[in-house]
Amino acid sequence: MYKLGLAVLTVAAMVLAAPSPAAATTTTTQTSITIDRHASELFPFEPPVGEPGVTYPATRVTATADNCPAGIVLMSASLVQDGLPTLWATGGRGAGEIVCDGGTVELSMAFARITPALHPGRATARFSLRDWDTGEQFAESTRTVWIPC
């Protein structure tokens, strides 16, 4: 009798501990960002509110976001070279807003610095994605990138 009761309790514990079939088929996919190793070559950038005709060296950093949630997503991007931050080299309107479809999306941002100017060499790039409404962060990635000559 003792062995039969122990066997029943063991089977009951196994049934209760087993995950439900619905839980077994549900997988949560995480958003991930992969930053390209190489930035673009330096190019001249004329700030929209700067002195006309005066340009500064700028570079573009690109990345890929996988499993980006569908809808409008806020993108934040930064570039640091020689321990100093840079500015976005963009006109500004709509910058940092991307539309995702639940799959893969290309991310891109250009950066410039007036003084000291950006130069060929190493820099640290960071991208992050946040929910438009709640501010919840979906993903963030940082990588050392190379600005070519």
Image (cartoon, rainbow, N blue to C red):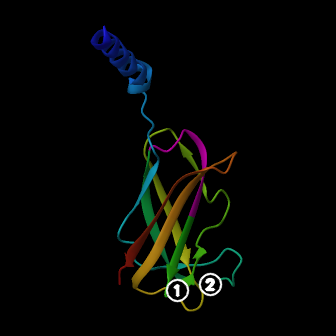
Q: Quadrant of residue 103?
A: top left
- The type of residue carrying mark 1 is Gly
Q: Which residues are magenta?
A: 67-76
Q: Residue at x 60, y 68 (%)?
A: 90
Label 1: few (<14), some (14–19) or many (≥20) C-alpha neighbours in 10 Å: few
Return the residue nearer the eye: 139 or 55: 139
- Residue at the extreme left of the image, as rendered: 3
Magenta segment, prevailing SS (helix, strand or loop): strand
| Screen quadrant of the N terminus | top left
Which disc, if any, is residue 83? 1
* First-in-chain label (1 vs 2): 2
Q: Position of residue 27 (x, y in %)?
A: 42, 33
- Residue at the extreme top of the image, as rendered: 1
Identify the secondary structure beneath mark 1.
Answer: loop
Q: Residue at x 40, y 85 (%)?
A: 120
Which disc, if any, is residue 20? none
